[in-house]
Image: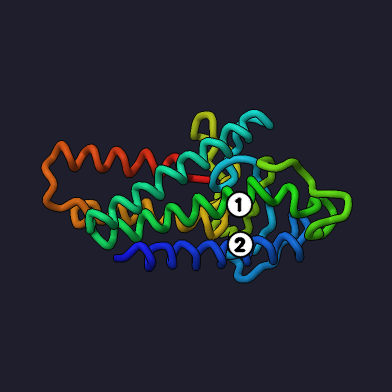
Amino acid sequence: MSLKKSLGLVLIILLLDQAIKIYVKTHFRLGDYVTVFDWFKIYFVENNGMAFGTEFGGTTGKLFLTGFRLVAIGGIFYWLYNSIKKKESKLLIIAISLILAGAIGNILDSVFYGRLFSDSFHQVARFLPPEGGYAPWFQGRVVDMFYFPLFEVTIPQAFPLIGGKHFTFFEPVFNLADSAITIGVAILILFNKRIFGSKNKAAYQNEIDKVLNDAHNAVA
């Protein structure tokens, strides 16, 4: 797979991800939702942290996380370029491309959205509001919207600590960028033998460690 095709895949995912986010941001108030099916809703939430709504440590943590993501994106791009140069497995290149697209998709929210949009509390956000955005550069919130409440259960009282608690599966709200990262990591795990096939055991283990580390760093 060529670099041109790989970057084309990244660009398509980025355009779709940003188009969905901008539409939701400019048509929904925070907390608004539309029921598509009983088990699928478009539900507008924002988060300050990582993938699937995970939070990370206030303003300082937010700046650290954003900076860390930028470094991780540089590393993932080098990994992609190097894999293409070495004519590695097409599956590997697709997986890295998905992870790269997802990482960039969420970093765009973090870097730019705070300045480009007004906030979404009790109102639909405006693009380039005259009074300025809702947050400084690098402190924007990531837009999430895909919610799959497939089923709900109440844990029996007999279970210690969690007995009696109500549980929804799947509760986290996520976006297309999160999905791209998850699919990329899943490809690496499910097809690892096909991807890394004939490498000796030590090299294989090093490659797996690098894959999982970079994928973890990219989750955004």
Q: Nearer the viewer, residue 32 or 196?
A: 196
In the image, which disc is placed on residue 18? 2
> Could one spot residue 42 in this view of the protein?
yes
**Residue 40: horizontal and vertical position, in percent?**
58, 65
Where residue 176 sits in the image (x, y, percent)? Answer: 53, 60
User: For the point 34% across and 53% down, which residue is it?
Assistant: 81
Q: Is residue 152 visible?
A: no
Q: Give above or below for 144 relative to 201.
A: below
Element assignment for label 2: helix
Contact (Cβ within 8 Å) of mark 1 with mark 2 = yes
Earlier in the chain: of badge 1 and badge 2, it is 2
Name the residue beneath numbered marker 1: 108
User: Which residue is found at the position 15% from the left and 36% from the top?
Assistant: 202
x and y, in percent, of residue 191 in the image:
25, 56
Outermost residue on the right side: it is 131
Q: Residues within 10 Å of mark 1 (few under 14, many from 20)?
A: some
Residue 53 in the figure: left or right of residue 99? right
